[in-house]
Image (spheres, coloured by chain):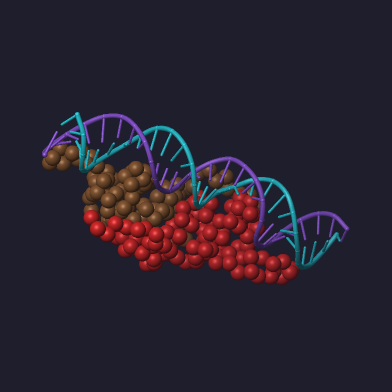
Chain colours: A red, B brown, C cyan, D purple
Amino acid sequence: MTCSGDRLLEMLSALANPHRLRIVATLSVMGRTYVSQLAREIGISRPLLHLHLRKLEEAGLVTSRLEVSPDGKALNFFEVVPFAIELTPAAIAEAAPSLTAATKNSDS
Amino acid sequence: MTCSGDRLLEMLSALANPHRLRIVATLSVMGRTYVSQLAREIGISRPLLHLHLRKLEEAGLVTSRLEVSPDGKALNFFEVVPFAIELTPAAIAEAAPSLTAATKNSDS
DNA sequence: CCCACCAGTAAGGTTTTACTTACAGGTGGG
DNA sequence: CCCACCTGTAAGTAAAACCTTACTGGTGGG
């Protein structure tokens, strides 16, 4: 998986957190789950989970889909995206030039 | 590369920063370099670079070695460690259980 | 002696991130 | 009507990350 430096950075930032790592792991093992269920499973509050899920979704690592259960409740199901990021010095060297904002030294 | 969840988290945290990504990239391309040279190349101040290098070294992604140049100056050379981290949902699921502090829900 | 290069560190401030509590609204059922 | 479940978000705070400026100390050479 090759992507722009900014996107790589966004994915890394999304994964660089124990809760979010555990969220991805849980979704990977359990498959599709809705928010409240996931919060119970991981053992954190719903608002906090919601915050982390938002970050993961923005990074494109999980997806959500609102569904209505047989008994009429609206459940927001999340599932993990089957990403595969190769993290090596060479891969980083390839992605780094496309990082924004840098204002890198071009003279010397 | 399989490692404990805490260590994975440490490496991800170390890489989840544009400066540090650029540092790894530059070291990967240039090979061994000393601190001041690297700071000039990347275009950030030495104290700031020093901070980022420390974090990368703590995560085991770069190594340093103090050497004396022919003209007597003490130069601290850094080089990148040839790491290879596989970042997939399955790999994260494997690493996550060994994250500390969690106090995860075991009942239900 | 002063300047240029190298190294590291400490203090202080700004900015992000993380988290909690509290609220608002939807459904179905006793 | 109230309770249990689901959803989301806003406000305020605590903690961590980030960055700058300033200082200390080493070398060699004009």
- Location of residue A79 with respect to C14 vertically, above or below: below
**Where, quadrant-wise, is the N terminus of chain A in this rendering?**
bottom left
Q: Is residue A15 left or right of residue A108?
A: right
> Does the rendering let one see residue B82?
no
- Residue placed most toward the observer, A21 or B63: B63
- Residue placed most toward the observer, B85 or C5: C5
Residue A21 image position (x, y, % from top left): 50, 54
Residue A63 image position (x, y, % from top left): 55, 67
Please name the residue shown 46% across and 53% down the image: A16
Residue A7 image position (x, y, % from top left): 43, 63
Q: Is residue A60 left or right of residue B38?
A: right
- Location of residue D21 with respect to B27 vertically, above or below: above
Q: Quadrant of residue A8?
A: bottom left
Please name the residue shown 52% across and 60% down the image: A56
Residue A47 image position (x, y, % from top left): 63, 54
Please name the residue shown 53% across and 63% down the image: A57
Please name the residue shown 45% across and 60% down the image: A10
